[in-house]
Image (cartoon, coloured by chain):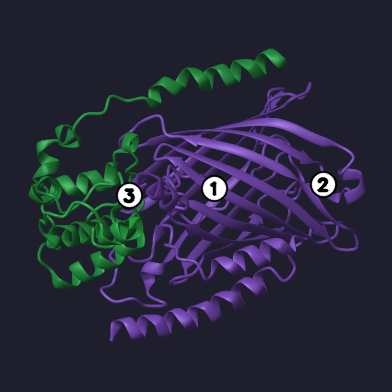
């Protein structure tokens, strides 16, 4: 009986999943992302128990052998500028239980302007301590190759400002920034709450100074215990929290002066047998920030993508 | 400029040896209070059902749907695992064995981890050592 209920629920979820993905990506600049993620709705997956953050990293790494495919979007209308819609495809792979590697591909579309591919990032995260502690550190190092037309806003550092977003796409594409970004990620679990702090130091590979930033996040699942029977809308499938992040100036002028700062609630929902969707409106806290920045994310985890092949080899 | 960039890389490289921890039997690291922790859901049929769902979502791809292990991933129905205290299994869910590929599940709420422990302990010992799913695949 449970099997037939389960298969019926799965069929309904497939339809629901396609609807959600198609509506979220209707405006995405990279159409192939839509096709790719839509396809994943029909593959086996598990839901990830990650905090619902967009900018802040926690100490959670991808499980070894799993590949998470995610699409992160941001929509905003900067003052005196045109509305932009950015999209970033993330491919996150658990290389080891203590090492996660990730590739980002970003693009954006600006109203009354063009749609452009704005660059890529390659990041690695390492857990130096192999057990859980009150505060769990993770080391993060990333190489970025992004044009100034990039609008993904995956982190805010230095003196980033809303005025950076007023450049026309053709102007932004003329200059590419190549930089190394490092983060110290600190994360704690306290009575099933997650509290994470990130300290960012970024250096462009040119004569630019070091730029600094931070992100803080706090979240919790809406239910701590799982229910005995599968359910579509039960609280255990939701996680909620809040994030605050912004720039901290650079090595020539450390502090909050002439930086942008954001604060916002965030919520995530795990669709049974489908992707996890997250949403967060971020509110600018000072005059350098965009008024409201809407972020959304759809992520999908494929488990043990290479395991079957390695099992074959062992069996031969 | 280039020097500061290289220094950054060297700092990260210098921290890399920290990643190579000495691996010993996982039970050795568990403190007595952790071993003695009691499961608030012990024997609860609903917790077993909930734990079964969590196991299917998070654990079955590595340990097999029947928890008999897959490839190098161990069976959870061996005498060693089944004779472990619930506190010991809870400890390993929280900490993982990172060097051997078992991730930490500290992001799961504590109550959910206890439900998983309840389910794993309900499985009992079996002499089979590899998932029938995996065997079928190898055939």
Disc 1: host chain: A
Mark 3: few/some/many CA within 10 Å (<14, 14-19, 20+): many
Look at the image and tell me in which quarter the N terminus of chain A lies: bottom left
Question: Which residue is label 3 attached to?
Answer: B105
Q: Is residue B98 left or right of residue A165?
A: left
User: Who's the residue at 36% across and 68% down the image?
Assistant: A236
Question: Rounded to the nearest whole Å, what is the CA distance between mark 1 and mark 2?
Answer: 24 Å
Q: Give percent across and percent down for residue A263.
A: 59, 53
Q: Is residue A104 above or below residue A41?
A: above
Q: Give percent across and percent down for residue B42.
A: 11, 62
Question: Which marked residue is nearer to the observer: mark 1 or mark 2?
Answer: 1
The chain coloured purple in the image: A
Residue A230 in view here = yes
Q: Are marks 2 and 3 on the same chain?
A: no
Question: Which residue is label 1 attached to?
Answer: A92
From the viewer's side, name the closer residue of A37 and A121.
A37
Question: Which marked residue is nearer to the observer: mark 3 or mark 1?
Answer: 1
Q: First in sequence: mark 1 or mark 2? A: 1
Q: Is residue A27 left or right of residue B113?
A: right
Q: Is residue B67 left or right of residue A79?
A: left
The chain coloured green in the image: B
Residue A152 in view here = no
User: Who's the residue at 26% across and 48% down the image?
Assistant: B93
């Amino acid at each position: 009986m449970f099997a037939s209920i389960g298969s019926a629920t799965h069929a309904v979820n497939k339809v629901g999943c396609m609807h959600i993905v198609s509506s979220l990506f209707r405006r995405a600049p990279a159409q192939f992302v839509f096709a790719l993620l839509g396809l994943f709705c029909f593959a086996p997956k598990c839901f990830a128990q990650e905090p619902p953050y967009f900018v802040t990293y926690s100490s959670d790494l991808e499980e070894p052998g799993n590949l998470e495919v995610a699409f992160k979007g941001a929509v905003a209308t900067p003052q005196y500028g045109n509305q932009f819609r950015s999209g970033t495809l993330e491919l996150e792979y658990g290389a080891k239980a203590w090492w996660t590697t990730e590739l980002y591909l970003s693009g954006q579309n600006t109203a009354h302007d063009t749609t452009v591919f704005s660059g890529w990032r390659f990041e690695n995260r390492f857990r130096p301590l192999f057990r859980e502690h009150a505060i769990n550190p993770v080391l993060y190092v990333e190489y970025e190759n992004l044009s100034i037309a990039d609008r993904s806003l995956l982190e805010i550092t230095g003196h980033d400002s809303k005025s950076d977003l007023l450049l026309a796409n053709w102007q932004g594409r003329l200059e590419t920034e190549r930089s190394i970004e490092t983060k110290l990620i600190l994360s704690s679990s306290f009575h099933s709450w997650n509290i994470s702090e990130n300290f960012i130091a970024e250096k462009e590979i040119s004569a630019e100074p070091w730029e600094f930033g931070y992100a803080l996040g706090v979240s919790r699942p809406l239910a701590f215990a799982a229910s005995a029977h599968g359910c579509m809308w039960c609280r255990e499938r939701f996680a909620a929290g809040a994030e605050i992040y912004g720039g901290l100036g650079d090595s020539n002028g450390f502090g909050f002066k002439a930086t942008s700062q954001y604060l916002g609630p965030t919520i995530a929902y795990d669709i049974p047998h489908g992707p996890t969707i997250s949403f967060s409106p971020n509110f600018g806290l000072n005059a350098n920030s965009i008024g409201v920045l809407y972020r959304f994310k759809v992520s999908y985890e494929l488990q043990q993508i290479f395991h079957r092949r390695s099992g074959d080899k062992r069996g031969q | 400029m280039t020097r500061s960039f290289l220094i950054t890389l060297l700092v990260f490289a210098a921290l890399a040896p920290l990643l190579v921890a000495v691996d010993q039997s996982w039970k050795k690291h568990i403190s007595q209070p952790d071993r003695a922790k009691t499961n608030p859901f012990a024997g609860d049929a609903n917790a077993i059902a909930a734990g079964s769902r969590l196991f299917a979502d998070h654990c079955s791809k590595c340990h097999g749907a029947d928890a008999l292990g897959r490839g190098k991933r161990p069976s959870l129905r061996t005498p060693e695992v089944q004779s472990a205290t619930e506190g010991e299994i809870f400890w390993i869910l929280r900490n993982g064995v990172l060097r051997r590929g078992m991730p930490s599940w500290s992001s799961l709420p504590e109550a959910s981890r206890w439900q998983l422990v309840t389910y794993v302990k309900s499985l009992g010992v079996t002499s089979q050592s590899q998932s029938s799913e995996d065997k079928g695949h190898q055939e």
